[in-house]
Image (cartoon, rainbow, N blue to C red):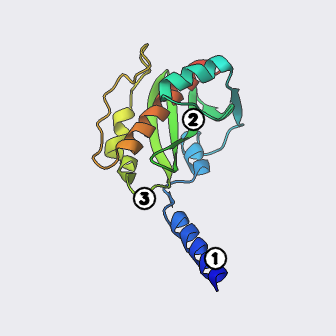
Amino acid sequence: MHHILTLTFLLAASLVTQAGTTIYQKPTDFIRSHCGGTIPTTKYLTLTASHQSKIRRLMGHEYRPARVRYWTHGGKMVVILDEIGKTRPITTGFVVSGGKIESVKMLIYRESIGAEVRRTSFTNQFKGAVLGSSGKLSRKINNIAGATLSTRAMMEMGRVALYLDQIRPK
């Protein structure tokens, strides 16, 4: 009987965890919407130790992926990044053009609170931002009460997206 209760509890816990995932837009649909309706050939950027070191400074912690996938269309770079909000990854699409953020969209949110960062009133703050020499975004991003960690994660991903655009082959 004890095993059945434990199994039931674990199943219920996993369903609650899954229930916290909200897909606002599929990553493939985001790519298509910024690449003329198609998905261009996937390109890969291999992150060297030097790149990883710079990203660590931009994010304030290690960045795990050794390779990052991205797509290009008309001089723009489209990249989808994941970063932990409080405990779960936030999947966000970025479009960078001419060294500036052109578009940001939260694609998948897995936290129980803080999803307000998906709103266009928040993501529009990133438009036109560039990466300053200090490693900070050139635009002030206002925090959202109750979504501090999600705001921080979005800012970190924005800095990384701009850096990836700088180092990708042109």
Foreground pick, 121 / 33: 121
Q: Mark 2 or mark 3, which has the lower sequence index?
A: 2
Q: Is residue 20 above or below residue 75?
A: below
The picture places residue 159, in percent across and down from the top left corner, at 47, 27
Whether residue 169 is visible, yes or no, is no
Residue visible at 38% across and 41% down in the picture? 151
User: Mark 2 or mark 3, which is nearer to you?
Assistant: 3
Q: Mark 3 or mark 1, which has the lower sequence index?
A: 1
Q: Mark 1 or mark 2, which has the lower sequence index?
A: 1
The picture places residue 130, in percent across and down from the top left corner, at 42, 22
Whether residue 34 is visible, yes or no, is yes
Residue visible at 51% across and 37% down in the picture? 94
User: Mark 3 or mark 1, which is nearer to you?
Assistant: 1
**Relative side of 134 to 82, left or right:** left
Q: Amino acid at mark 3?
A: Ser
Disc 1 marks which residue?
Answer: 7
Task: Name the image quarter holding residue 62.
Answer: top right
Q: Amino acid at mark 1?
A: Leu
Foreground pick, 103 / 12: 12
Disc 2 marks which residue?
Answer: 78
Instruction: Compute the Cα span from label 1 to label 2.
Output: 42 Å
Task: Name the image quarter holding residue 35.
Answer: top right
Q: Amino acid at mark 2?
A: Val
Q: Is residue 38 above or below residue 74?
A: below
Mark sitting on residue 112: 3
